[in-house]
Image (spheres, rainbow, N blue to C red):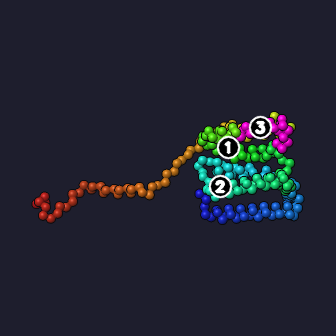
Amino acid sequence: MESEASRPTGRIWAAAAAVALAVLLWGGYGGHWSWTGINGHTATLWDWLHLLLLPGAFAVMPVWMSRRTRLARRHKSVALTSLTLFMLLVLAGYMVPWGWTGFSGNRVWDWLELILLPLVIALAPIFPEVRASWTRRRSLLTLTGAALFGAVVLGGYLGGWRWTGFHGNTAWDWLHLLLLPLLLPTVVVPALMPLATAGVVYVKEEAPSESAPAAPEPEPEPTGERAPAPAGDPATG
């Protein structure tokens, strides 16, 4: 359990990191400090997504997808609003186009390279839980999504859909794209889990019950001496 004394220290470090990041961003974008490597050409929103999507997905997705957690309505509204705004931003980045987004020129293949691996890594810890609660509806949705994706792939190769970015990618490129995301939840994680949990003993702590009856006080042991008889008792006569 986190101690009360460590909380102010953590907040101080978080504030210091935020100030350092703000200075770095200001120096890179506003001050044109070349040593930062941060500018409108080399650090667009697309580049920031490559940097932050993996830790962000790893922090959020296991919590959202777990059966043991429930999102409040307010959190669901915030997530849905954020996703909608991001999709509008993506559309604007392509249609306007906004150069600072870095979206223009990136096709479906590039988005797969951006999203697929962070998503799989984030969901790998709860993959057994998701598989145990798998339903027929999820299977139907998965098959539908796979069919739509297959149609897009065929359109990219046979129909010349340039926006897909699939044309020109060989089987070797597909291996680079899919091999690690497919192997992580199906082979790597199941193989490492027994090794990681070997020798680990799970102890279930039971809180003491406040309503438990108090233990009776022990009775005094007999000393072998006979108690004096009361006055007038015939036994004393």
Q: Identify the residue under disc 1.
A: 124
Q: CA distance from mark 1 to mark 3?
A: 27 Å
Is label 1 or label 2 in front? Answer: 2
* Magenta segment boundaries in residue numbering: 145-164
Task: Report the front residue among 200 and 146.
Answer: 146
In terms of sequence position, does the residue under pointer 1 or pointer 3 come before the other? 1
Q: CA distance from mark 2 to mark 3?
A: 31 Å
Report the residue at 35% width, 56% height from top: 216
Q: Identify the residue under disc 2.
A: 76
Q: CA distance from mark 1 to mark 2?
A: 23 Å
Quadrant including the N terminus: bottom right
Residue type at mark 3? Ala
Report the residue at 82% width, 45% height from top: 107
Chief SS of the magenta region? helix
| Local crowd size for mark 2, using a 10 Å CA cut-off: few (<14), some (14–19), many (≥20) | few
Task: Report the front residue among 23 and 83.
Answer: 83
Assign a secondary structure to mark 3: helix
In terms of sequence position, does the residue under pointer 1 or pointer 2 come before the other? 2
Q: Is residue 128 visible?
A: no
Was residue 74 drawn as part of the magenta stretch in this picture? no
Is residue 227 found left or right of 235 in the rendered image?
right
x, y percent for residue 94? 83, 52
Residue type at mark 1? Ala
Quadrant including the C terminus: bottom left
